[in-house]
Image (tube, grey):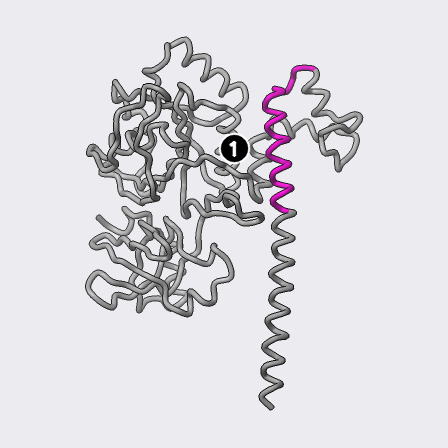
Amino acid sequence: MTYKDLGYHSKLDAFKQENNLDAFNVGRIALEHKERYVIKTPTSEYDAELIGNLRFTATSRSDFPAIGDWVAFSEYDEGKALIHAIYPRSSVIERQAVAKQGQVQIIATNIDYGIIVQAVDRDFNINRLERYLTICHASGIHPIIVLSKIDLITGDELNTIIQKITLRIKDIPVIAISNLTHDFHKLEDVIENYKTYCLLGSSGVGKSTLLNNLLGTELMKTNEISSSVNKGKHTTSHRELIVLPNGGILIDNPGMREIGIADTSDGLETTFESILDYAQYCRYKDCSHINEASCAIISAVEEGEIDEASYNNFLKMQKEKMHFESDALERKKKDKDLGKVIKHFKKQRKDLKF
């Protein structure tokens, strides 16, 4: 294995030279657990933690390493390392943090493709699919839709699902695979060497089975499907970066029950481009496309030119985005006010010493 096999490229090397990081080793974050990390290099893996300065100067979660990051590190004992710097990220997949208003959760970084897995039986939900697409588009990565467990439905039912997708979602690859026939070569054929892919989807859709088949071994243990809910009993509990034997890098990801929309203006515009194309014909430039007179989008929905379900999903996600932005501004204001209080307190203590 080489650094190129891990996704290392010339821009990262240029950053290393420009920032005088030659004295440090370079590696990629393969695992993360409560501010403890596993760094992967072509020859070794290291248990790592941050140096104090990097930890205490961090102002947000984005200042800490995440799965997929390239980092500069030094080895201080056999298999032990300290992280000194994080290399610039080419992309960041993130969502609104669960139960934390105005905050984001980083899922993975430096991703080229997002593999969105949906089981075609009970899990399939095209609204949720549009949410995953919005996250991918906001991150600037290329989405690939994988429909799993097609052995559980008929060919006609599968064709109906694919037709629903292509009517609402344009120019995104759709790959249908079966757990019985093991036709995973369909996905292998589109995976490129040195590119990084992130698995996205709910629990029980077959991500672990998919990963095992791409690896050709049972890395992620899976159990029999529950007959009551048609879902696997095992779910991935952590994110992990894995180099595939036939090329490509894959990040496995725990199932996400909530896919909260954060600051994703570009993502929404790309996912719902076919809807927003009508906005140029609205009477008002600041049209919200909800209840304004002479709204071209509303007229297109009423005339059947725009899918009503997709339009409703767009409105729901746009509303979430607006709430997130409002919460983020409020949180920023509170942090700023708290900073002023702390600064004033420190000044008072300093003055008392004289």
- The residues colored magenta run 303-325
Name the side, left or right, on which 158 lies relative to 221: right
Residue 319 included in the magenta stretch of the image: yes
Which residue is pictured at 75% across the width and 26% down the height?
A: 295
Which residue is pictured at 26% across the width and 31% down the height?
A: 222
- Dot 1: few (<14), some (14–19), or many (≥20) neighbours within 10 Å? many
Instruction: Decide which of 294, 310 is in the foreground and name it.
Output: 310
Which residue is pictured at 39% across the width and 35% down the height?
A: 255
Residue matched to label 1? 131
Give the tally of numbered discs.
1
Instruction: Decide which of 349, 185 is in the foreground and name it.
Output: 349
Instruction: Decide which of 327, 149 is in the foreground and name it.
Output: 327
What secondary structure is marked by label 1? Answer: helix
Residue 226, position as x, y percentages in the image: 31, 23
Looking at the picture, does residue 145 appear above or below residue 227?
A: below
Q: Amino acid at mark 1?
A: Arg
Residue 279, position as x, y percentages in the image: 70, 30
Quadrant for residue 278, please give it. Answer: top right
Looking at the picture, does residue 87 appear above or below residue 230?
A: below
Which residue is pictured at 29% across the width and 66% down the height?
A: 74
Residue 272, position as x, y percentages in the image: 59, 30
Residue 56 included in the magenta stretch of the image: no
Q: Quadrant of the C terminus?
A: bottom right
Name the side, left or right, on which 266 lies relative to 184: right
Residue at the farthest bottom position: 354
Quadrant for residue 245, please give it. Answer: top left
Residue 15, position as x, y percentages in the image: 40, 60
Secondary structure mostly taken by the magenta-highlighted segment of the chain: helix
